[in-house]
Image (spheres, rainbow, N blue to C red):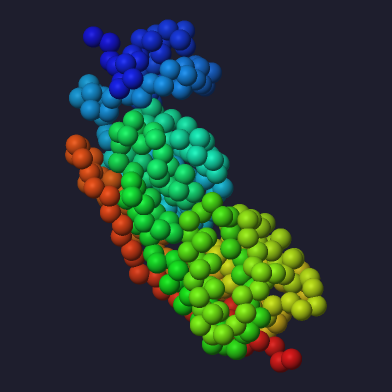
Amino acid sequence: MARRNENGVTIRAVAQRAGVSAMTVSNVLNGAGRASAATVETVRAAIAELGYVPNLAARRLAKARATTVGLLYSNRRTPFLDAVLVGALRATNAHGLQLILRDGDGVRRDEAERLAQDLVRSGADALLLIPPFAEQLSGSEILPALGVPLAAIATGTAMQDVTTVRIDNRAAMFSITQQVIAHGHRRIAYVAGPDHYSVVAARLDGFRAALQQAGLPDEADLIVRHGEFDYEAGKAAGQRLLSGKDRPTAIICSSDDLAAGVIAQAHHLGLQLPADLTVTGFDDTILASRIWPPLTVVRQPVEDMAFRAAQCLIAALGKAETGVSDEIFDHEIMQRQSIACPPAQ
């Protein structure tokens, strides 16, 4: 009997559309055999066109293979992603599972949906997400059809249909902003990152709450938004914030990569750090302790969070119905040399 998915589409129908054998389609779905890149692309196009999603229960019974966790991530390689990979690999290796990866842009929901479907068709029995894919897939109509558990790390909020493992981003940014204020800074800038990440709103809210508590103004021209979380966006933000006469004495950044870019631009402009400018980061990736000056940052235990999220997925495998949870890890302020009192006026 031909194997059908929930839409009634069979592997044979996919094979006919792609002009290949049913065995070739099966091999592409399961990552087995030897198919050329062109054949794989043709089969995947036919799968997408017909809307075929494999029946996971039948697939597990049909063959003995290692259960697979799929990781969906942005195509930018960062120290944050490296920590996610280590944590996910620790969990999957400990349970004898496979980890497969898929990268993409993920800013639009349809792109995130396509990549998630592609991972499931390639053999993923569960999906581990990092922003912005969690935000894009939460609430999507395709989730029931995927038929796999999902977990996300480092989101800004809990989600009703995706398990989340995160820190309290608002409280974390509130704390580090308080420390900058306690050093005497009153003109403080903020580099936020892209709006499509839920952490951006949570961290910006924490920054503003700390300013309000201290009686400091919330000045729109001192907040840089809409860029990415990367080094180049940090350099651009530094150029914008530091080129004028009335520059800030401190810049709080929503990622270590952003902070590194700000520091590079400050050095380029001839500023002495931290004497002329305080800069802070967020994440505590390996970069934070290896640049000059070493960054004072919010540390979120990314590797441990990824490990825990993968554990949640593993626990959900094989269950007919799984609940959704929200676990909040503790954050920590790592004190290094990038904070100082503001220069004398």
The quadrant the N terminus occupies is top left
Image coordinates of residue 304 in percent, x first then y, are: 35, 59
Query: Is 207 on the left or on the right of 10, as rendered?
Result: right
Image coordinates of residue 60 in percent, x first then y, are: 23, 27
Between 257 and 342, the residue placed more toward the observer is 342
Between 62 and 162, the residue placed more toward the observer is 162
The image quarter in which residue 6 lies? top left
Image coordinates of residue 343 in percent, x first then y, are: 70, 88
Count of numbered marks: 0
- Residue 34 visible somewhere in the drawing: no
Residue drawn at point x = 61 percent, y = 75 percent = 218
Image coordinates of residue 211 in percent, x first then y, are: 55, 79
Residue 223's place in the image compared with 306, above or below, is below
Residue 294's place in the image compared with 51, above or below, is below
Query: Is 94 on the left or on the right of 37, as rendered?
Result: left
Residue drawn at point x = 53 percent, y = 67 percent = 204
- Residue 177 visible somewhere in the drawing: yes
Residue drawn at point x = 51 percent, y = 78 percent = 210
Residue drawn at point x = 52 percent, y = 45 percent = 74
Query: Is 323 on the left or on the right of 32, as rendered?
Result: left
